[in-house]
Image: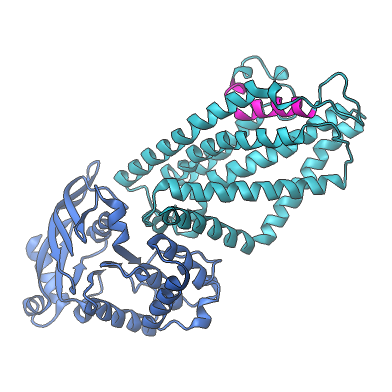
Amino acid sequence: MLERYLRPMWAFVFRDWHLTRRYMSWVAVFVFYAIVNSATIALIGKAQDDFRLTLTLLLGVLLWSFLSAMYNEIANSISYERWEGTLEYTFMAPVSRLIHLSGVSLFAIIFSVFRTIVILVGLVLFIQVSVNGANLLGVLVVLLVASLAFMGLGLMAAILPVMSPENGAQATNIFQGILLLVSGIYYPVSVLPSWVQPLAYLSPATYALEACRKLMGINHPDSTPDKLVGAPLSTVLPELGVLLLMGVVLIPLGLWVFHTAEMWAKRTGKLKRTG
Amino acid sequence: MIEVDNLQKAYRKLHAIKGISFVVQPGEVYGLLGPNGAGKTTTLRILATLLKPTSGSAKVAGFDVARESLAVRRNLGIVNGGMKVYDKLTGYEVLDFFGSFYDLWGPGLKERIAWAAELLHIEQAVLSKQVKDMSTGMQQKIVIARAILHQPQVLLLDEATAGLDVFARRALLDFVRQYAELGKTLIYSTHVMSEAEEVCDRVGFINKGSLVYEGRLQEALELGSGNLERAFIRRLEEAA
């Protein structure tokens, strides 16, 4: 019985895997660019000879690389179908949207994890920093919980290209840009203009970063370049709670928004194969 | 079986379909014929659950398209001249992906792909090619194979020969008759009358969202003194 649900879900994972490997040269180009971009940001900290700044920037580029890649994969999944001209047939497949989008999201997570690992390995060539004493397992837990919230945001953004092919795709990128700006990826939220700061508390990335900085011991007064004083997971329970709550709210909300917009598209004839 | 009852679709001020009704029996090929913009594709998109009707009802294989869309999709295949498959996947990967949605996997799926390939004269070597490296005709065969992989009770073909060369077109028309002989229900939508003459058992003429004529192919031919195109034009002029 379970197989009946898992098979179609895996079919989406494998479809995306086959498509990704056929576009491998483009994936390599984008990952190369991401490594170079990440290195140029992280080297700012190295130039200042400030291990805290270096670690803040490194954590920022890696966390954003993971979360934004996942958001992109999910948010653009419908745009990709339009470009391929396969949107109608995928929407006609006799599977629930939950299974369809779960498959897409699962691949997005797997892809983002591998992409981030490759970027991390690439960064090691440019910057050597010690993470001795950091609670890396805790960071992993925070990333997993944060990915739920980003999945929900991605689901909501994914339907935008159905409603308006060009404007929708543009809106997903603008939304991603706003998240990058307000979440304090490379700087504390306090440096943002006061009218922007409240938005930071709506972004899951803000809580993920705050938690990860504590777990890595970046701002701990006793941390040194050779030995960080990472906090135990229990100290970031408030951030984890907020992230979990966001995930629990945003995923069903994302599915509901997707379903509602799909029904609207079917009523108004917007569900077209191209556009 | 397909049952369409007083089906209507309106977009604000535009009435794309104005209350059409028809029934297609198993083993029958029903030709839905009309000029561009007549409402053929809109009708088929409603049957395929890609559009919600404004009013009226439609059933596919006994399931209501508005209320039982998942069951409809399980029993339906659609081929449209403009529909595509993933360019960068191989033919086999495309069929493997779509087969997974119909409880097909492992040896059962392999058998079914072999069945579709044989029916459509697709060589095994072609299935291992990426779709982008196939001819237009072969790509269309992959689209058809995808649509029939689950052996649906109902198959909708909408301008399915568009862009095909003479050999691929011939293969498709032969396939339509073969598939109907398996007891399946087919709608063949086109504006090419010669194709309809060849494959349809009954025809419906649709114009400006209304069904202006319905009858057996032979009756329609008699209406146009042996020529379906003449019958079509005459009936549309009378209805205007």
Q: Residue at x 39, y 64 (%)?
A: B82
Task: Give the colouring mode of the picture.
Answer: by chain
**In the displayed image of the protein, which residue is found farthest to the front?**
A1
Picture quadrant where residue B63 is located:
bottom left
Residue A182 higher or lower than A30, as above or below: above
User: Is residue A55 left or right of B97 when viewed as pictured?
Assistant: right
Picture quadrant where residue A213 is located:
top right
Nearest the eye: A143 or A172 = A143
Q: Residue at x 59, y 44 (%)?
A: A72
Residue B183 higher or lower than A131, as above or below: below
Residue A216 image position (x, y, % from top left)? 78, 29
Nearest the eye: A5 or A47 = A5
Which chain did the image draw in blue?
Answer: B
Nearest the eye: B237 or B169 = B169
Magenta span: A199-216
Query: Color of chain A here?
Result: cyan
User: Is residue A156 left or right of B160 when viewed as pictured?
Assistant: right
Magenta-highlighted stretch: main secondary structure? helix
User: Is residue A177 left or right of A94 when viewed as pictured?
Assistant: right
